[in-house]
Amino acid sequence: MNACAFSPDGSRIVSASRKSLKLWDAKTGAKLGTLKGHTGWVTACVFSPDGGSIVSGSGDDTLKLWDAKTGAELATLRGHTDTVRACAFSPDGIRIVSASVDTTLKLWDAKTGAELATLAGHTCEVKACTFSPDGSRIVSASGLFESTLKLWDAQTGTEVASLAGHTKEVVACAFSPDGSRIVSAGLFSLKLWDTKKAELATLKGHTYEVEACAFSPDGSRIVSASDDGTLSLTNPSSVKHVTSEERR
């Protein structure tokens, strides 16, 4: 299985594997349906904020919109030229952002599936993307030969900032609930940033690649998952902040 997500009300789960998705009852574990249509491995999936639809990304270079209740395919979003690695709805559910191995991100109309903009600036595959809590910004993470995060204006698709500091590929990123900070995951470590472009701290402890990271709903904790077989919980307010001298 490549990805999974809860519906906003917590009643259902969607999971992605091979060329299909499945819907599950989160209370009983019963399978509710299978969503078929992709011709490549399904790499990402997420519910819309109102729980009415699901978007998925695939190795067939497309995204698909699905009716979350019936499992019916609503639209196919075509435009990427390589595998779609990640996707996310805007907080208001009006737009979708997607990240691809083709080095670009794209903005889409979540109702019609129409392409709205291409976000170009990365020079390596884009591995992760998400909207800020207020929907005004997008953060994206790039692969091995670039190892940066980029901030984008979510309305215009223009690049706002490039956050450099990781020395290996960045595979995950997330905004804090108040939108003031970003956590990113790379080889062995995480980094904490503020959205004014400054690196705040490096969070160390894992002994192998960090694959995922997230803030708690109240922003008081960061959780990270690693190929070393462990999860780590960190209080972001307790970490030692990086000074300008230490960055040099």
Image: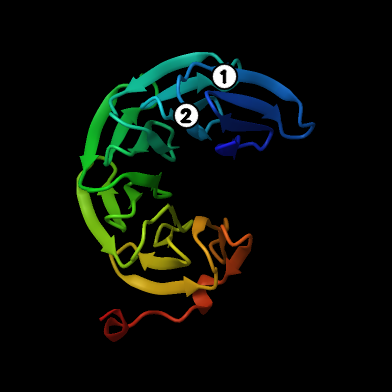
Which amino acid type corresponds to the residue marked 2 in the rendered image?
Ser
Does residue 94 lie above or below 123 as drawn?
above
Look at 27% across and 82% down and name the residue there.
244
Residue at the (20%, 45%) spot, across then down: 158
Q: Position of residue 118 (x, y in %)?
A: 23, 35
- The residue at the point 45 percent across, 58 percent down is 178
Quarter of the rendering occupied by the C terminus: bottom left
From the viewer's perspective, tell me whether residue 170 is left or right of residue 164.
right
With respect to residue 241, does 14 lie above or below? above
Q: Are the residues flagged by discs 2 and 1 in contact, CB closer than 8 Å?
A: yes
Q: Is residue 196 left or right of residue 42?
A: left
Where in the figure is residue 43, as x and y percent of width and height? 48, 35
Q: Which residue is mark 1?
A: 35
* Inter-mark Cα distance, 2 to 1: 10 Å
Mark sitting on residue 168: none
| Residue 156 visible in the displayed image | no
SS under mark 2: strand
Rendered residue at 20%/47% (across/down): 121
Amino acid type indicated by mark 1: Leu
The N terminus lies in quadrant? top right
Per the image, the residue denoted by label 2 is 56
Position of residue 66 measured from the top left corner of the image (x, y, whole percent): 50, 20
Which residue ends up furthest to the bottom in the rendered image? 245
Residue 20: image quadrant is top right
